[in-house]
Amino acid sequence: MHRHFKIYKPYGYLSQFITNQKTAGKFKLLGELYDFPEGTMAIGRLDKDSEGLLLLTTNGKLSTKITAGNSEKEYYVQVDGVITKDAIRQLQQGVDISINGSTYRTLECKASILKERPVFPARAKKIRDERHGPTSWVSICLTEGKFRQVKKMTAAVGFPTLRLVRVRIGQEKLDGLKAGEVVELPTVAL
């Protein structure tokens, strides 16, 4: 019987259970958050500096289905500056970013300005404050997931990412989890 989990991956953690890197001792890994069963794997990744919803499973076929399929992933992104409607339109239409040294055109996506600042747990590393200029929050929904794609997209339209929180994968939502909190799921709703 396979088991499934959703967690709020905190800032500073790698989306994995082991690392081969020589500097392994300085990285925090998912296994430090919960006693997961053997064979548990992350479905997709969030880089060390990103946080939010991460799904885990012992079912490799489910993992492949979600990462290779068209499951929509929604991110709330705090950007440097007051983002413009033109920048949102560019994000929606797709922008050119660099992937492995080549130019890649992102797919069309949903993007919008968040009218209210979302409430998330305090981050382990402080984000610069408003004294250094205004910030704004946007929602970006993607069906693809290239390496650091959202950060590269906001930078491409002139608004670098300051904080990135994934709030949804398919039908599974962050739902007010605290940073580091783990919830076992009966199934994964796509």
Image (cartoon, rainbow, N blue to C red):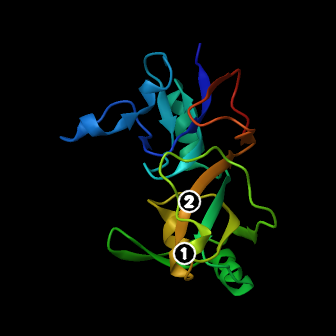
**Residue 87 drawn at (x, y percent):** 66, 82
What is the C-alpha distance between the residues marked 2 and 1?
A: 15 Å
Q: Residue furthest top?
A: 1
Q: Residue 163, which numbered label?
A: 2
Name the side, left or right, on which 166 lies relative to 105: right
Residue 78: image quadrant is bottom right
Q: Residue 132, which numbered label?
A: 1
Seen at 50% across and 64% down, the residue is 149
Q: Residue furthest bottom?
A: 86
**Residue 5 drawn at (x, y percent):** 61, 27
Q: Residue furthest right?
A: 115
**Residue 56 drawn at (x, y percent):** 55, 31
**Three-letter amino acid code at disc 2?**
Arg
Name the side, left or right, on which 186 lies relative to 17: right
Earlier in the chain: of badge 2 and badge 1, it is 1
**Three-letter amino acid code at disc 1?**
His
Seen at 67% across and 47% down, the residue is 120
Which quarter of the rendering shows the C terminus? top right
Tag 2: Cα neighbours inside 10 Å, few (<14), some, or many (≥20)?
A: some
Q: Are circles 2 and 1 on residues that touch, CB within 8 Å? A: no
Q: Where 137 sits versus 93, above or below?
A: above
Q: Kindly state the secondary structure of the residue where label 1 is placed.
A: helix
Q: Kindly state the secondary structure of the residue where label 2 is placed.
A: strand
* Between 178 and 53, the one nearer to me in the picture: 178
Look at discs 2 and 1 and give the one toward the viewer. Answer: 1
* Between 59 and 7, the one nearer to me in the picture: 7
Seen at 53% across and 59% down, the residue is 127
Q: Where 164 sits versus 190, above or below?
A: below
Q: How many numbered circles does the render carry?
A: 2
Name the side, left or right, on which 69 lies relative to 124: right
Seen at 73% across and 41% down, the residue is 173
Q: Where 154 sits versus 41, above or below?
A: below
